[in-house]
Image (spheres, grey):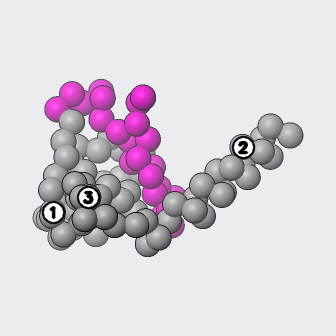
Amino acid sequence: MKTCAAFCILALTIHVARPAELPVRDSLIFRLEASAQAEARQAASLPPIQRFQPVDIALDTSSAGRRAMQAVADRRPEFVSNGEAAYFKFDG
């Protein structure tokens, strides 16, 4: 029963939090969309990011075009993707 509940919550979260539906506010500082990283990295001439790879540079997908970096390698978020959906897994 716990597995079913966890799966339902996960499925609902994925459906509710799709990047195209995220509201953009005037005060937005950094838009971090895992599913847009492959295209953003290619546009920035960065090497592609692989599944389960620690993220060296996360790119802002808003018009600001900022970059976020974690200098400590073992503290970097992990990029998780199945080819259709993607997310960042943080350590905290």
- Percent of width and height locating residue 82: 51, 58
- Percent of width and height locating residue 4: 80, 46
Return the residue nearer the eye: 4 or 78. Answer: 4
Q: Which mark is residue 28?
A: 3
Q: Which mark is residue 82?
A: none
At 24% across and 30% down in the image, what residue appears? 73
**Vertical placement of 10 versus 72: above or below?**
below
Return the residue nearer the eye: 21 or 50. Answer: 21
At 66% across and 58% down in the image, what residue appears? 12
The amino acid on which the numbered mark 1 sits, given as a three-letter code, is Gly
Residue tagged by mark 1? Answer: 65
**Labels 1 & 3 near each other (Cβ < 8 A):** no
The amino acid on which the numbered mark 3 sits, given as a three-letter code, is Leu
- Whether the magenta-drawn stretch holds residue 83 is answered as yes
Query: Residue 45 lies in what quarter of the image?
Result: bottom left
Question: Mark 2 or mark 3: which comes first in sequence?
Answer: 2
**Front: mark 2 or 3:** 3
Q: Which residues are magenta?
A: 71-92
Q: CA distance from mark 1 to mark 3?
A: 12 Å
Q: Is residue 63 left or right of residue 7?
A: left
Q: Is residue 66 left or right of residue 27?
A: left
At 19% across and 46% down in the image, what residue appears? 68
- Whether the magenta-drawn stretch holds residue 64 is answered as no
Please say whether residue 38 is visible from this viewpoint: no
Residue tagged by mark 2? Answer: 6
Q: Residues within 10 Å of mark 2 (few under 14, many from 20)?
A: few
